[in-house]
Image (cartoon, grey):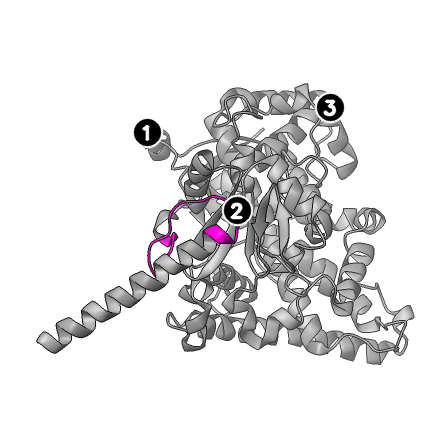
Amino acid sequence: MELLFFYATCLIVAVSTVHLLGLFADRRRNLPPGPLPLPLVGNLLSLGAQPHRSLARLAARHGPVMTLRLGTVTTVVASTADAARDVLQRHDAAFSGRFLFDGTHAFAHYAHSMVWLPATSPRWRALRKVCSGELFAPHRLDVNGSLRQEKVQELVSHVARLASKGAPVRVGRLAFTTALNLLSSTIFSTDLADLDDSRVAPGEFKAVLAELNYTVGLPNVSDFFPEVAWLDPQGLRRRIEGLFRQLHAMINDQIERRIRERAVAGDSSTHTQKNFLDVLLDYRNVDDGRGFERQTILSLLSDLFSAGTDTSSATVEWAMAELLLNPSSMARARDELHQVMGSKPVIEESDIGQFKYLQAIVKETFRLHPLAPFLLPHLADTTLQVRGYTVPKGARLLVNVWAIGHDANVWPEPEKFMPERFLEKEVDFRGRDFELIPFGSGRRMCPGAPLAVRMVQLMLASMLHRFHWRLPTDVEKNGLDMTERLGLNLSMATPLQAIATPV
């Protein structure tokens, strides 16, 4: 017993000594200020269930650029618009690396993914160029406008069927399915999901994708203690690998189907209608004439489906929730729609530019409920001085977009839903105005932002134009649960259900 006590005492002394030496070394390295870390866990216990809120409170005490020790990972957090500009614009090149989550090692995803590849990689540049030019460019988006129109009308028809039965509408799920079918039609020329939730089987594309998005967003010990990542202590990497395997198999089926169709057609240029998968299959690098590897195509399409579904559906769900809680804002939006549309039953994308208040609603939703409250983590590729402090090479960099959107020095009454604030001043959310950067900024900005915004605006406008909305009686009585759940995106902990009545 005495020997056990002796060894325990030695261990405590050793850990404490290492911890104190680490604190002394941090002071000498001139890191940005931050809360005092505990031995071993560092500042992990300060995160809580809503780290975007916890870190915003810490930033109010320690400053707009602060350091935390999250496990064994040195993490620098920017929490104001000016601090975000330092990270994403002034030092864009030095901070454009990616901190790799452990889950990205499944199937070497990090080595093929546009999201996780370094910005200096030729493969990253090729993927970015193809997506920006062939999928998200304005002229490509215009060409696919009729497709978005078709998918949104399918959503409206489904809501009408639910309304005729008096059944509640699961807003987020329907928006998720609509976004998924839009992407699958654009990429594969086919739908991959049914708007009727009752028909979804566990192994279907939609179910696997939703499960992957959920699992990837779970906190992982390996991301805070990379030294033990090889153990996969929570088994998350194995779960992610299994889900990737299922998703890749379904995507691969679509690829093989398209290859067979092209072989029958003989010449892809005379094929029925070229989709994005055709673009990827036809791609040849100008330097060596080589195309994309199959694993690169699988990783890219997995990223597109994962990011393109969750972001749009979460934004539509938050916007509808806020409008249901703010009837005057919903009434003003409907009045605007009526004034612009008159008796015209179907909203087209060309009409959206006239809906100034609707656009303000979307911006206010981005501000209050940013899709990714920390964006994706950056990595310092070199040691650099920022605001007189040292950001060491290898440090993880987070931009607290949620804190920026709730900064009372920038936004009066930041907790209130007030779309009117965006009618009074012009604020761009495409990476130029750092007060509102839901999609990031700089070379790592989300390239899919133009498509996501078009989808959100069209879905929201169509649902408001065709239906009156109210909360179910029990929710109206007990109050709408606006609790946040932070996973892959910031979503509603309790999915929104609402009752629609045709206009």
In terms of sequence position, does the residue under pointer 3 or pointer 2 come before the other? 2
**As displayed, is residue 454 above or below residue 395?**
above
Q: Which residue is mark 1?
A: 477
**As displayed, is residue 325 above or below residue 200?**
above
* Image coords of residue 282 (percent x, y): 84, 72
Looking at this view, is 426 or 69 the one in front? 69
* Image coords of residue 197 (percent x, y): 49, 55
Start-end of magenta stretch: 27-44
SS category of the residue bearing label 1: helix
Could you say which quadrant of the image residue 319 lies in?
Answer: top right
Q: Residue at x 43, y 32 (%)?
A: 471
What is the CA distance from the residue labelled 3 to the residue labelled 2? 44 Å
Could you tell me what secondary structure mostly forms the magenta stretch?
A: loop
In terms of sequence position, does the residue under pointer 1 or pointer 2 come before the other? 2
Q: Which residue is mark 3?
A: 340
SS category of the residue bearing label 3: helix
Q: Is residue 269 left or right of residue 160?
A: right
Q: Residue at x 40, y 40 (%)?
A: 483
* Image coords of residue 363 (percent x, y): 63, 33
Query: What kind of residue is marked 3?
Result: Val
Count the numbered circles shown.
3
